[in-house]
Amino acid sequence: MISKAQFNKELDIIISNAVREDVGPGDYSSLACIPATAKGRAKLLVKDEGLIAGVEFAQMVFTYVEPSMEFEVLIPDGNIVKHGDVAFHVYGSSQGILKGERLVLNAMQRMSAIATKTNHFVKILEGTKTKILDTRKTTPGIRALEKWAVKIGGGENHRFALYDMVMLKDNHIDFAGGIPEAIEKTKDYLDNNNLDLKIIVEARDLEEVELILSAGGVYRILLDNFSLEQTRIAVDLIGNNCLTESSGGINEETIRGYADCGVDYISSGALTHSVYNMDLSLKAM
């Protein structure tokens, strides 16, 4: 996974680009009717139920638009909230509060929805060894926020991008000439370029599982679109040779069944691509 420094850099890029996109040459609505010296206070009002996420990010945003902004956390990230709760207070430049308002709400509404959905899956998996993973099926430009939200919800991050882990999927395997060829070429490439990256290989059937095991040197085998019966057989076949991951159309009705097969991980793109934003509002006090 990427380092904390790299992750923070991604957050800085998200904030600066979002403010550029939203504010441009100026927030003329605020500039027109609110004095530059005016001070104000606002609260983050919850109008929904679920897991709150993005409070820490909101503080980063307000500090970016106005370094002297005061921020009081009332409900930290990862806590259950209900309608009427207030997550934080912010005090400072009225223009600054309005400048950061939409970015904060857009981010928090989506992050909270992702954290809530992730936590729902985590609870379904309680009592098993299986952990829930996100994927790269994220919104372009804000991947760091969405993966952060998964962590807040109790899930784990898969690779962040194409550069922090090797994942040989069906197209890689087919273009490379087969599983043995793809794995061997990958090992050579990593050695020749002094790269210390874990290798995950996707299997489409039990025959491919056997081919992956024969090649060796793999960190995790991804069992893609396997039935429950195929998954149980694959887990027994793999044993302690490497870790296992299930994926492919797994939902809240089927996820427990796959976990009971003994897989180490279940990855779900739905954590980030199929959520409904939590209803939040920033109100002047």
Image: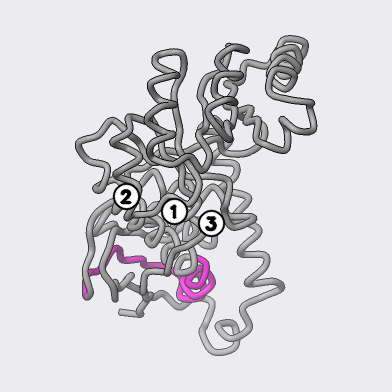
Residue bearing the label numbered 1: 271
> Disc 3 marks which amino acid?
Tyr
Residue 195 in magenta?
A: no
Is residue 111 positioned above or below 203 on the image?
Answer: below
Residue range highlighted in magenta: 84-103
Chain-order first, disc 1 or disc 2: 2
Task: Please tell me whether mark 3 sits on a helix, a strand or a loop.
Answer: helix
Q: Mark 2 falls on what kind of element?
A: helix
Alpha-carbon span between mark 3 and mark 2: 34 Å
Dot 2 corresponds to which residue? Answer: 121
- Please provide percent x and percent y for residue 247: 48, 42
Judge left or right: residue 14 versus residue 190.
Answer: left
User: x, y percentage for residue 240?
Assistant: 40, 14
> Residue 88 magenta-drawn?
yes
Point out the frontmost of discs 1 and 3: 1
Q: Nearer the viewer, mark 3 or mark 2?
A: 2
Can residue 67 be seen at all in this image of the molecule?
A: no
Residue type at numbered disc 1: Leu
* First in residue order: circle 1 vs circle 3: 3
Query: Which residue matches tag 3?
Result: 64
Q: Residues within 10 Å of mark 1 (few under 14, many from 20)?
A: many
Q: Is residue 127 above or below residue 91?
A: above
Secondary structure found at label 1: helix
Residue at x 42%, y 56% (from the top left corner): 59
